[in-house]
Amino acid sequence: MAVNLEKELTEWRDKSYRQAALIRRLSSEVSNLKLANKREEQKPNTLDESLKEQINHGLYPDANSD
């Protein structure tokens, strides 16, 4: 009886450790994703000047014809 209880306790403890490790990994992944998202939001929303000119010329071809 005591051997069975000890075995169950060991299995339960091992399972708990695995679950805790999984929770730590998932928590870390969530933190990394939040940081990546925050960095992405902070990036300036700029276009290269030549690309801007190409877009403007494509949208308004007569604008630079003077």
Image (cartoon, rainbow, N blue to C red):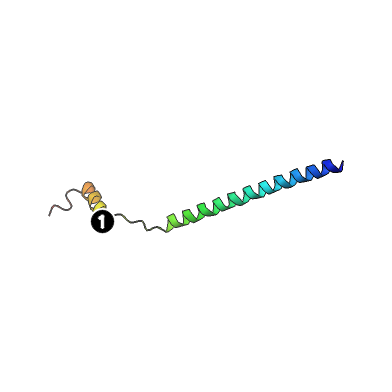
Viewer-nearest residue: 29 or 49: 29
- Residue 1, given in percent of the width and then of the height, sits at 87, 40
Callout 1 secondary element: helix
Residue at 23%, 50% (x, y): give it.
54
Residue at 37%, 58% (x, y): give it.
44
Q: Is residue 13 left or right of residue 48?
A: right
Kind of residue at badge 1: Glu
- Residue 52, given in percent of the width and then of the height, sits at 26, 53
Viewer-nearest residue: 37 or 17: 17
Residue at 66%, 46% (x, y): give it.
18
Q: Is residue 28 left or right of residue 63?
A: right
Residue at 42%, 59% (x, y): give it.
42
| Tag 1 residue | 49
- Residue 4, given in percent of the width and then of the height, sits at 83, 40
Viewer-nearest residue: 38 or 56: 38
Identify the image quadrant of the C terminus. Answer: bottom left
Q: Residue furthest left?
A: 66
Q: Residues within 10 Å of mark 1 (few under 14, many from 20)?
A: few
Q: Residue furthest front?
A: 3
- Residue 26, given in percent of the width and then of the height, sits at 58, 49
Q: Is residue 66 left or right of residue 31?
A: left
Q: From what the image shows, is residue 43 above or below residue 3?
A: below
